[in-house]
Image (tube, rainbow, N blue to C red):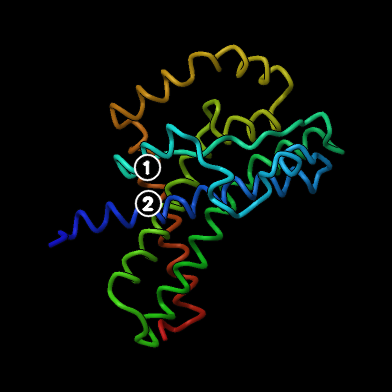
Amino acid sequence: MFTTDLITIVLRIPALLIAITFHEFAHARMAYHFGDSTAKDYGRMSLNPLKHLDPIGTLMILLVGFGWAKPVPINPYRFRSYRSGMLWVSFAGPLANFLLAFVSLFLFYALAGLNVGASIVYQLVSIVVQLNILLGVFNLIPIPPLDGSKILTALAPRSMAGFFRQIEPYAPILLLFLIMFRVFDLIIIPVFNIIFNLFNSIVLFFTGSF
């Protein structure tokens, strides 16, 4: 019989596929809005998860329940406004995750209020909420190649772009170090709790918890 832990691990796979698909689609759609059709031309402006899967990232999803997608190709020099384009294209991915988490949380309460669905459905929706908030917060960290570094570059003076280019070759090692020693937990968990509690309060306010 499946244990709860094993079921959770299995449910993380579709939940992650949903999260990374919406994340990458949002990048592609926003880039297209600002005049860059590169992602669309490569077939990446799609909600088909197969279009966004990275071989190693997919293997990690299957093995450990966490992974990543192929970065959406963009050409920022095709944006109508370089700075605005970089800002909103970079922010679009995390924003999509937050919106998906909010909608999923609303769905969770709606299903519970109507007493519809099996317990595994509630568990899946709950995991979708959690993973999307975590993915959104994680990607806002200003370390290349995460979206936060591109957002900061778009907002900061031009000299900051040169700084990020200098540290980019070492960024994967830095990210691995911070993940291994759980330094990110000091940032991600408190921010996750703030966002989750905010979303939960808003949903409960409008639904009255059914």
Q: Which mark is residue 13?
A: 2
Give residue 6's position: percent from left, percent from top.
21, 54
Q: Residue at x 46, y 46 (%)?
A: 135
Give residue 144's position: percent from left, percent from top.
55, 25
Give residue 101's position: percent from left, percent from top.
48, 60
Foreground pick, 34 / 154:
34
**Relative to 83, 11 lies left or right:** left
- Disc 2 crowd rating (10 Å Cα; few below 14, some 14-19, many 20+) is many
- Disc 1 crowd rating (10 Å Cα; few below 14, some 14-19, many 20+) is many
The answer to which image quadrant residue 120 occupies is bottom left
Q: Residue at x 59, y 46 (%)?
A: 93
**Relative to 15, 28 lies left or right:** right
Asked which secondary structure carries label 1, the reply is helix
The answer to which image quadrant residue 150 occupies is top right
Q: Which mark is residue 61?
A: 1
Q: Residue at x 43, y 36 (%)?
A: 57
Foreground pick, 60 / 97:
60
Instruction: Work out which quarter of the rendered image holds the C terminus and state it.
Output: bottom left
Q: Amino acid at mark 2?
A: Ile
